[in-house]
Amino acid sequence: MTRHIISIGDFDRRQIDRLLDNAKRIDAQKYDKNALTGKILATLFFEPSTRTRMSFEAAMARFGGTSISVGSVEACSIAKGETLADTIRVVSGYADAIVIRHPKEGAARLAAQFASVPVINAGDGAGQHPSQTLLDLYTIRQSMKLDGINVALIGDLRYGRTAHSLASALSLYHVHLHTVSPKGLELPASLHADLEEKGMEITGYDNIKDLIGNVDVIYMTRIQRERFPDSASYFNVASSYRITPELLKDAKKQAIVLHPLPRVDEIDPRVDLLPHAKYFEQSKNGVPVRMAMLLQVLQ
Ligand code: NCD
């Protein structure tokens, strides 16, 4: 296995399970607080981020390590026309690992080719978001076994990188996928074919109410406005699906609602008060899971 983490496909099932077990031990405070003392993590975020960046930085700090960054893209030499390859070569000289988020699909893979230190993909355009998937799996595992469950993926499955990574990972666990998305925002055909080839059962629906009684996990996603060619095409599909307490009346009692966040209007705030709502716990789980990832690449 490479020391880079670019796609969830870089992991097999055994490696995912082991990482989640490590995260659980860390969550129970069973870790060396100085495990990464003296190590430096560079966070290179060319797109907005709250959770991913802050939880990687918090994870580093919990192990006694340090994080450095350029602040904003406008403030660094990319604004002067420097290539990503050169930036990565330079940053490799300053840090022991690099976490990168970039609007272009494939950017993290490219960065890994030029880096002399491990690279972690924190989201490449509409591509992949492996650290999010690992914390999604961790959160599901807190409520139920991953094997044999029914998972609903709802929203922007075309541009949503969290949906892509999660669907791929779930194909390792005999999960039945149930999808609802606005027209034109279905899972990419190549990913759909790939998942079916791996034996995953995928059923598409027009409405949330048609699947709500059948699923154990309801994974909501934001329509990825920044990936649309213009605002008219975004507003055509905006606000198509919303999970509400009324819809959840028909859900299984133990069903959980997840969302990578930020949410726009796809989860009614009244859902926050229901026991189904696990999305804030999910974001909190970013810290132990990313701590386990940092140990894997830095130790
Ligand atoms: C997601 C992302 O950046 O892909 N955010 C996150 O990392 N939690 C989801 C999103 O922006 O919709």
Image (spheres, rainbow, N blue to C red):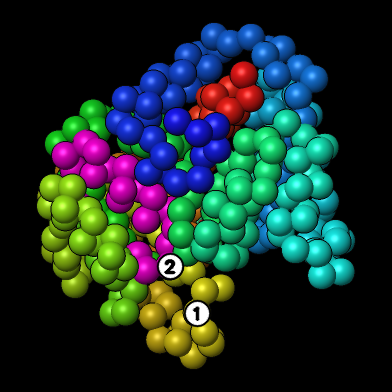
Q: Is residue 285 visible?
A: no
Q: Residues within 10 Å of mark 1 (few under 14, many from 20)?
A: few
Q: Residue at x 69, y 28 (%)?
A: 60
Q: Along the line of sight, which residue is nearer the eye, 100 or 84?
A: 84
Q: Is mark 1 within 8 Å of ligand 1?
A: no
Mark sitting on residue 205: none
* Image quadrant where residue 208 sits: bottom left
Instruction: Magenta stretch: give its range.
Output: 157-177
Residue sitting at the far bottom: 232
* 109 left or right of 143 in image: right
Q: Which one is earlier in the sequence, the residue at label 1 or at label 2?
A: 2
Are the two marked residues, 1 and 2, in contact with CB atoms closer than 8 angstroms?
yes
Q: Residue at x 23, y 56 (%)?
A: 194
From mark 1 to mark 2, how far is it between C-alphas?
A: 9 Å
Q: Residue at x 58, y 11 (%)?
A: 31
What is the x, y in percent for residue 52? 60, 45
Q: Secondary structure at mark 2?
A: loop
Looking at the picture, which amino acid does disc 1 mark? Phe
Looking at the picture, which amino acid does disc 2 mark? Tyr
Q: Residue at x 85, y 61 (%)?
A: 77
Q: Which residue is mark 2?
A: 159
* 262 left or right of 79 in image: left
Q: Is residue 21 above or below residue 168?
A: above
Q: Quadrant of the N terminus?
A: top left
What is the x, y in percent for residue 17? 35, 25
* 112 left or right of 192 in image: right
Q: Is residue 190 above or below residue 228?
A: above
Q: Secondary structure at mark 1?
A: loop
Q: Quadrant of the C terminus?
A: top right
Mark sitting on residue 228: 1
